[in-house]
């Protein structure tokens, strides 16, 4: 063997030894060490004992967290996978991250990263899976993201990012999943996204997008999941969405400006979750819905639907939840539509009929309708839509401990027990017949199941009544309390809140949750995008909001409504929607025509005293004026 051949042999042997030794590219060794120190992870990743790409290191296995994985097929090993998931790392994204040019899988979700996403992200052109979800990032998505042309999954969900979406997102033509929900993105959704023909999942809820619902979404025919709730987008829902025949989960909500029709969905018959809540859906309920054999959840509440519920709706093969509340439906409730497997909300419609006496109040919500049942109470008729209550009013106050047991406060106020179990479609009248509560909605994918109360063992500061705030009613959609039998008058309404589900732990992703909901009293919205944690100055802190309300029909209606905004999944999936701890209502002015004699005498005394006082003031002013005029007279010499 010649010298040249021997040299090649030694060089090849050396390359083999290097490859077998999992030696990491020296530049990447420096970079990963700086990254580990930047995020204070040295105790979890001790790079002084192992090479970053050592397959025997504790961070190498698939289930490791943190995890560093490498491609060692070349002369040196290159880091191509980095996972630091849910470890509460704090700080900005370090520039050393962009030295790892072979990176194809980067998961930094559920941390407390802040600052903006650097433009250098566009240098990682081999990236396939990229997640910055659930952090505290701000600023826009950099246009350079469009350089990641082989990206499959992209997540910026649950941050504080803002600005318009860059058109360069349209360059990600291999993208299959995109999560940009729960941010503050603005402007129209760029038409360049029409090039994402491989897109299967798009979560874009809870943003400030404006303009029309994009018709081009109808060309993304691989879409299986589309979520567009809680935005500023305008209707109508484009007919082109009817081409999305692979849809399994479609959630559009809180659309205004124009009416929409259900016609577009007729050919999307394989869908299992369909929520078009508060979308100005007009027209009648179609017969063909009953042929959707996979449909489990159908929510068409808070729309403008008219006509009757088709008789065929009793034939749904797999439907478990049907929400038709707050529409303009009429006619008879179809016979046999109420089953043991269906949760049904038909509240606030002009529907008549009968509910079987043995049907549980946690599975049917028919408040505000003409429907009767053997377990219904006369006062519940006063809650019917457009009804005139003839029930004699006898009460001038009510106090409710929402979601908990009876409590007497340090001021001696007794708050009624409200610990009854509610469900996905419920109406419950209190034992004293003075108030009622209804709840609608389902916590989809909640690992803790369908629980409509929240509990905390922590002491609640800034109040002498900590126990009042340790339990609360929660709802994924609509929660309403009704005072019934109230005398006519002007009432003071006190709503007690404390955020006992979402933490505000500093330097933890579990403190990043944001809950927003609206509150209406007597049909008038008094709070929009209300954030209990923010207004109270933190979690598990008491907050009281006070309002005035006019009761003219013996009924007080307090409505807590989720409008699709906020985070969905902190600390667990399906943590969102309204929350309320207690309600206290007292009359300030009695306007009841049936006031007893003592009330009338009291009012007469008040009027008499007022008129007498006014007359006295007038006399005094007259005497003073005459004296002043005389004083100004040249002939005035004093008394």
Image: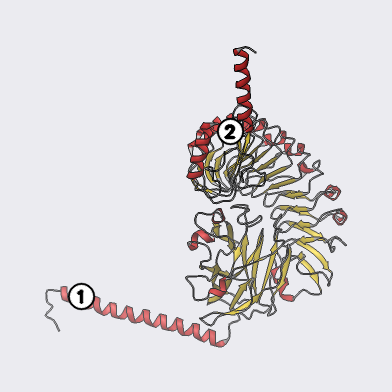
Give coordinates of residue 237: x percent, y percent: 69, 42
Quarter-wise, where is residue 583 in the image?
Answer: bottom right
- How many residues crowd mark 2 within 10 Å: few (<14), some (14–19), many (20+)? many
Q: Residue at x 80, y 64 (%)?
A: 352
Callout 1: SS: helix
Q: Is residue 519 above or below residue 379?
A: above
Frontmost residue, 219 versus 556: 219
Frontmost residue, 631 versus 80: 80
CA gap between label 2 and label 1 equals 105 Å
Give coordinates of residue 483: x percent, y percent: 63, 73
Q: Which circle, 2 or 1, is nearer the viewer?
A: 2
Give coordinates of residue 110: x percent, y percent: 58, 49
Earlier in the chain: of badge 2 and badge 1, it is 2
List the residue tagged with mark 2.
Answer: 23
List the residue tagged with mark 1.
Answer: 628
Quarter-wise, where is residue 496 in the image?
Answer: bottom right
Quadrant of the image containing the C terminus: bottom left
């Amino acid at each position: 063997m010649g010298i040249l051949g021997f040299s090649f042999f030694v060089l090849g042997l050396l390359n083999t030894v290097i490859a077998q030794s999992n030696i990491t590219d020296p530049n990447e060794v420096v970079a990963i060490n700086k990254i580990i120190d930047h995020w204070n992870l040295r105790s979890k990743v001790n790079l002084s004992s192992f090479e970053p790409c050592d397959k025997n290191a504790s961070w190498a296995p698939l289930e490791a967290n943190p995890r560093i994985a490498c491609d060692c097929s070349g002369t040196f090993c290159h880091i191509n996978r980095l996972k630091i998931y849910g470890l509460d790392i704090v700080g900005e994204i370090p520039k050393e991250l962009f030295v790892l040019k072979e990176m194809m899988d980067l998961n930094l979700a559920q941390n407390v990263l802040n600052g903006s996403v650097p433009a250098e992200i566009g240098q990682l052109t081999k990236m396939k899976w990229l997640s910055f979800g659930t952090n505290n990032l701000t600023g826009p998505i950099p246009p350079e993201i469009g350089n990641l042309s082989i990206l499959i999954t992209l997540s910026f969900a649950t941050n504080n990012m803002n600005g318009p979406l860059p058109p360069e997102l349209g360059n990600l033509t291999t993208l299959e999943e995109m999560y940009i929900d729960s941010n503050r993105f603005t402007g129209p959704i760029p038409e360049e996204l029409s090039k994402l023909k491989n897109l299967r999942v798009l979560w874009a809820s809870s943003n400030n997008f404006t303009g029309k619902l994009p018709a081009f979404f109808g060309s993304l025919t691989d879409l299986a999941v589309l979520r567009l709730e809680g935005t500023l987008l305008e209707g109508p829902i484009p007919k082109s969405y009817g081409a999305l025949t692979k849809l399994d989960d479609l959630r559009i909500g809180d659309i205004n400006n124009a009416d929409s029709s259900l016609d577009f969905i007729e050919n999307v018959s394989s869908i299992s979750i369909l929520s078009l809540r508060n979308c100005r859906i007009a027209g009648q309920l179609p017969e063909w819905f009953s042929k959707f054999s996979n449909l489990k959840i159908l929510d068409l509440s808070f729309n403008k639907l008219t006509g009757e519920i088709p008789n065929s709706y009793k034939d749904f093969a797999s439907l478990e939840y049907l929400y038709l509340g707050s529409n303009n439906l009429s006619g008879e409730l179809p016979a046999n539509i109420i089953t043991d497997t269906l949760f049904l909300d038909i509240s606030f419609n002009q529907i008549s009929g009968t509910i079987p006496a043995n049907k549980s109040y946690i599975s049917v919500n028919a408040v505000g309708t003409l429907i009767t049942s053997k377990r219904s109470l006369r006062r519940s008729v006063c809650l019917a839509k457009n009804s005139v209550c003839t029930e004699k009013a006898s009460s001038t106050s009510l106090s409710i401990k929402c979601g908990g047991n009876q409590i007497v406060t340090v001021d001696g106020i007794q708050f009624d027990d409200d610990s009854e179990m509610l469900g996905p479609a419920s109406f419950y009248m209190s034992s004293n017949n003075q108030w009622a509560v209804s709840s609608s909605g389902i916590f989809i994918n909640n690992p803790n199941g369908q629980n409509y109360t929240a509990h905390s063992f922590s002491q609640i500061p800034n109040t002498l009544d900590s126990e009042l705030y340790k339990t609360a009613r929660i709802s994924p959609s609509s929660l309403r309390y009704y005072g019934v039998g109230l005398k006519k008058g002007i009432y003071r309404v006190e709503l007690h809140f404390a955020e006992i589900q979402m933490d505000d732990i500093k330097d933890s992703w579990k403190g990043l949750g944001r809950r927003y909901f609206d509150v209406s009293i007597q049909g008038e919205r008094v709070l929009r995008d209300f954030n209990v944690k923010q207004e109270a100055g933190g979690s598990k802190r008491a907050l009281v909001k006070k309002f005035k309300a006019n009761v003219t029909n013996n009924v007080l209606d307090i409505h807590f409504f989720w409008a699709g905004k906020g985070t969905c999944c902190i600390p667990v999936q399906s943590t969102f929607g309204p929350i309320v701890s207690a309600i206290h209502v007292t009359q300030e002015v009695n306007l009841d025509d049936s006031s007893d004699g003592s009330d009338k005498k009291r009012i007469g005394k008040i009027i008499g005293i007022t008129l007498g006082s006014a007359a006295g003031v007038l006399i005094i002013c007259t005497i003073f004026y005459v004296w002043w005029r005389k004083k100004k007279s040249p002939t005035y010499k004093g008394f």
